[in-house]
Image (cartoon, grey):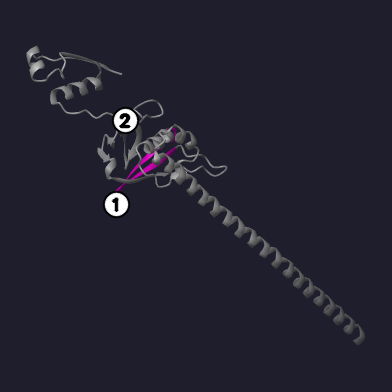
Amino acid sequence: EEELSVSVDLPDQVLREKYKGKLSKSVRGPSHEVIAQLLHGLTGKKINQPAPEFKAAGGAQAIRCALKADDGYLFGFDKAFLFVNKPTTLLPFDTLSAVEFKRVEKSAAGSAASKSFDMVVYRKSGESVTFSNIRRGEYSSLFHFLVAKKLRIKNIHKGASGLDLDNEVDAAEPDDLHMRRVKRDAEEAAALDDDDDDDDDDDDEESDEDFKAGDDSDVDEEYEEDDCSDDEEAAMKKSKGKKR
């Protein structure tokens, strides 16, 4: 990463009295840290930084994705999501109602697995924002970040698929009711899906039984019709022989 060195051309007395030690005479380090320190020192305003637990698969503090037709980076802060470069979009967590994952289900047998997924963020106002083409490798860390920030995940059973929530609950604080609710919701939703699958299987079995029973009846009727037609044909031949 690019290193930057900046010297502040102000008298020491001004630095002490006006900036009260918040602005150093010289600042050196990674460019983004230097700029942040200078802005903080000059304005006295708090500098928001990405949350420590928000990490991309490669260790970066932003996840590459797309908003509408524009590629950019999604940052996760303690109280908001921020998408840059354009359209720059700030999503404070207290304005959100839920988050939903798209295209996260396991692919059917024989089909190629999707290399990316989408995340839809729902605002309390009813609007939604879709971040698309997120690399599948970012899925686990993003899911756990949402859980840590206590954001509601609409399709929790699909989002939790393949993740070890038991370890998450064990590592959580004893009074962390949210983490326990996340695990319970995932288990209940998964159980409902299993019940639906069982009902479908039962319906298929009943249909198969009805089909088999109908087949036997149809075969018997066809066999009887064939017997009748053979007897009639024999009688007609015998009658013609007598006339001659």
Q: Residue at position x 43%, y 47% from top?
A: 155
Q: Position of residue 121 (x, y in %)?
A: 33, 44
**In this view of the protein, which residue sits in the foreground, 50 or 217?**
50
Question: Dot 2, how many residues are within 10 Å of its Cα: few (below 14), some (14-19), or many (20+)?
Answer: some
Spot the residue most to the bottom.
243
Q: Residue at position x 51%, y 52% from top?
A: 192
What type is the residue that disc 2 sits on? Ala
What type is the residue that disc 1 sits on? Gly
First in sequence: mark 2 or mark 1?
A: 2
Marks 2/1: CA distance? 27 Å
Name the front one of labels 2 and 1: 2
* 19 w.r.t. 168: above or below: above
Question: Dot 1, how many residues are within 10 Å of its Cα: few (below 14), some (14-19), or many (20+)?
Answer: few
Q: Residue at position x 83%, y 75% from top?
A: 230
Image quarter in which the N terminus is found: top left
Q: Position of residue 79 (x, y in %)?
A: 28, 36
**Disc on res. 51:** 2
* 21 w.r.t. 165: above or below: above
Pointer 1: what residue? 126
State the image quarter where residue 60 is shown. Answer: top left
The secondary structure type at the circle numbered 2 is loop
The secondary structure type at the circle numbered 1 is loop
**In this view of the protein, which residue sits in the foreground, 122 or 236?**
122
Spot the residue most to the front.
174
> What is the span of residues highlighted in magenta in the rendered image?
116-137
State the image quarter where residue 156 is shown. Answer: top left
